Image (tube, helix red, strand yellow):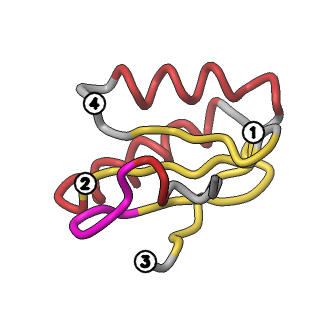
Amino acid sequence: MSGDGRAYGFGPGMIRRRVVVRAKDVVFLKGVLEASSGLAAVHALSGGDLTILAHASRAQELDEVLASLAIEVPFLSGPTEIDP
């Protein structure tokens, strides 16, 4: 099974972002994103290496939330856009 989100509903009309955080921050980040009116789904590739999936219509909102979260949670990498 692929860890890049393809097995979890990634397809037309969806966007992906990659973020790397400390393993201890994964649950917090996932909780915030998934509780934000279903803004995004989060899938762990390994440890804190995450693929975040959202509908393209919510791309700007997702990017704004990730920018805010980066202030609270030390991102080790990202967020970066993953090409479809």
The Cα–Cα distance between marks 4 and 2, rounded to whole angstroms, is 10 Å
Residue under the point 51% across and 59% down: 17
Q: Nearer the viewer, residue 67 or 43?
A: 43
Residue under the point 42% across and 51% down: 53
Q: Nearer the viewer, residue 38 or 5?
A: 5
- Report if the CB atoms under discs 3 and 4 are less than 8 Å apart: no
Q: What residue is shown with label 4?
A: 38
Q: What residue is shown with label 2?
A: 55
Which residue type does callout 1 highlight?
A: Pro
* Mark 4 neighbour class, 10 Å CA radius: few under 14, some 14 to 19, many 20 or more: few
Which residue type does callout 2 highlight?
A: His
The Cα–Cα distance between marks 2 and 3, rounded to whole angstroms, is 12 Å
Which residue type does callout 3 highlight?
A: Pro
**Horizontal relation, residue 49 to residue 35: left or right:** right
Residue under the point 48% across and 60% down: 6
Q: What residue is shown with label 1?
A: 74
